[in-house]
Image (cartoon, coloured by chain):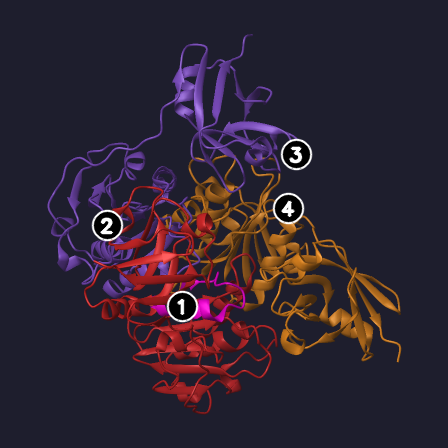
Chain colours: A red, B purple, C orange
Amino acid sequence: MKTARLITLTTDFGIRDSYISCMIGQIRQINPSAEIIHTSNLVGRQNILEGAFTLRNTLPFYPPATIHLVVVDPDVGGDRDAIAVFHHGQFFVAPDNGILTLALDTTEPEQMVSIQNPAYLSREISPVFHGRDVFSPAAAWLSAGVPMNLLGPGRTTMTDLRWSLPVYDKNRIIGQIIHIDHFGNAISNISRSFLENWAAGQPVQVSLSGWDPLPVSRTYSDVEPGDAVALIGSGGYLEVAVFHANAAGLFDIRPGSQIVVEKVQE
Amino acid sequence: MKTARLITLTTDFGIRDSYISCMIGQIRQINPSAEIIHTSNLVGRQNILEGAFTLRNTLPFYPPATIHLVVVDPDVGGDRDAIAVFHHGQFFVAPDNGILTLALDTTEPEQMVSIQNPAYLSREISPVFHGRDVFSPAAAWLSAGVPMNLLGPGRTTMTDLRWSLPVYDKNRIIGQIIHIDHFGNAISNISRSFLENWAAGQPVQVSLSGWDPLPVSRTYSDVEPGDAVALIGSGGYLEVAVFHANAAGLFDIRPGSQIVVEKVQE
Amino acid sequence: MKTARLITLTTDFGIRDSYISCMIGQIRQINPSAEIIHTSNLVGRQNILEGAFTLRNTLPFYPPATIHLVVVDPDVGGDRDAIAVFHHGQFFVAPDNGILTLALDTTEPEQMVSIQNPAYLSREISPVFHGRDVFSPAAAWLSAGVPMNLLGPGRTTMTDLRWSLPVYDKNRIIGQIIHIDHFGNAISNISRSFLENWAAGQPVQVSLSGWDPLPVSRTYSDVEPGDAVALIGSGGYLEVAVFHANAAGLFDIRPGSQIVVEKVQE
């Protein structure tokens, strides 16, 4: 192949130790022209769902045939499987713990194998660091053009893991906060399309515990600095922020906090 | 073009979420050979002046035709303009909020356009993430060789933002701390050239509130571990440090703290 | 040369300021095809031994002729030497403060020079940032194929710095914790090979102050979430962890804490 495929990296390994550098070294020894892009190595420790959310937000912006190496792997060395997946033009290499379902929106991808062929793994495999000794080599060989089916036997269904969907009736939606970002903005599990279908053009207001109800604004600066604002975030979900400040810190919002949308009585 | 231009990235988007990865993906979809260097994605949130300072310190070390993508953008989606700039052989893509003036040392760069041509932006533009949907595509197209004037109509003057200059008379300079670095070193707004012109060869001493006056030393290890030292930092500004320790933490120095230079009476 | 050599970067400069970006810019101005991999720029400030440990863990995973640029340099601008080293097929550029001995396991590498030739340094050298003005240019020129002996005169012995070895008799080993990683796992100075030679097949148990003795397990998930576990970490040293939690935080373990291994009386 002419152009080496990109490899994106989403992990909870942190950026202080040598873990990520070991993974990159492994990859580069196998494929010297592989190019690695760090999606995030600061996914919350052992937080599979946060890794899944990070991957999901990144996916739409990558070119076809990108390889997404996704390792949040609390059960490393146990009996969870290691999988390589091809779906909608992209490759994924990950533990089979549900970290891919949110991004792929299915548990039955177009093609999937169990990574088992020792020819494509490290000669010595640490039972506590498959990120380095199993997943990195597998991703590197894929990036070098090795067909996925050489990595191991085929599989059909992978582990499912998703956040709970919002509950709703005709008057209100009860959702929850799923992620607090770097700015302290609180992102919910209520997607724009779900919200728009439900509201059917009627104006709505958004409440978190202890906040005055807010209209859905267009951007942060629609309100004054220090004021709260609800809007559709860049990932397509309803989020709540405070302009020029940290909403989650100010109002003690956490993943799991309840968020309510109601139709405004006109 | 043969060699893709480098793109440096200076933002306050943090490194925990997928924001930076989305920007890189956007860039790489447009120009697969673009190479991105992270200057800092940990500029203080909404801190335009800190972003400007980071850019200014980086600029002298980059080759001609580098593209500097600089996004600290609290008013995203509001009415501030998006600009692309060419000045002294380098390109800049940024919100027009003053983040470039410190680095360029002018508000009237050699060439400037307002980024408006939808052909060079994302098809769908989130009003809360122009970093991904406006600035990244514009930088990517520039790196692919698109002439700047295709991005939008020309402009002449950009927003000005600088820190206050030191005040002085013939006996002393009163400056202020503008940045605390990773080591806790406190960097002032008093430049080496300003200081040397003012002192005209006479010895000087440096004081912060609550410190004994210090001579200007050459390097940290000119004093004993645990002792305070004043010197010209690597960015060319007078700074105060504690050898082997964190000066800002120990002495509660912050951006805005006063620093005084006096001529020593001989 | 056809393929530019990789340059890995291990420093305590942090990732918030422009320091690392200045180093990369310097390198790229000298060798536009140099490729930089960040091992860690978050080595503890002035912590030479932690930098050495990070480098040591990374080394086995890099291809021959990689250049390791290692700058934890509290005495910058003082009289410590700057060295370039070739050993076991890899290059190293670092201050001569002992940061290389742990990785090279010798103080007399195959080839070493004192970096002094001004032709391969910055024209202007800040006495407080040799990382940018001395070490980066030297590494860049090496990556561009400049023979090491052009950088300066040869040397034979470099500064030694290692952690204390464990003490032991036939009943027990007393070691110490040398590193707390991103997960809060506590890594000791007791290597797998040392432990296995000493135990000679007999079962052992591991104790930290205030813990019940633990067997040596294979991986984290050999115990229940919340339980402590001792195992051989991915770098080849005995480590103690808590499954799904932060061992160092929970039990106040720090670098220097004592760890004891005893033979189990059967």
Same chain assignment for discs 2 and 4: no
Q: Which residue is mark 3?
A: B225
SS category of the residue bearing label 1: helix
Q: Which residue is mark 1?
A: A53
Task: Give how far across and how far down residue B28 sits, in percent.
Answer: 28, 63
The answer to whether the residues at label 4 and label 3 have Cβ atoms under 8 Å apart is no
Using the numbered discs, state the Cα–Cα distance from disc 2 to disc 3 in whole angstroms: 49 Å
- Magenta stretch: includes residue C136: no
Q: Residues within 10 Å of mark 1 (few under 14, many from 20)?
A: many
Chain of residue at mark 3: B
Which span is picked out in magenta? A33-58
Task: Give how far across and how far down residue C83 sits, in percent.
Answer: 57, 48
Same chain assignment for discs 2 and 1: no
SS category of the residue bearing label 2: loop
Q: Which residue is mark 2?
A: B77
* Mark nearer the viewer, 2 or 3: 2
Q: Looking at the picture, which amino acid does disc 3 mark?
A: Pro
Q: Looking at the picture, which amino acid does disc 1 mark?
A: Phe
SS category of the residue bearing label 4: loop
Residue C216 appears in the figure: yes
Report the disc number at residue C97.
Answer: 4
Using the numbered discs, state the Cα–Cα distance from disc 4 to disc 1 in whole angstroms: 44 Å
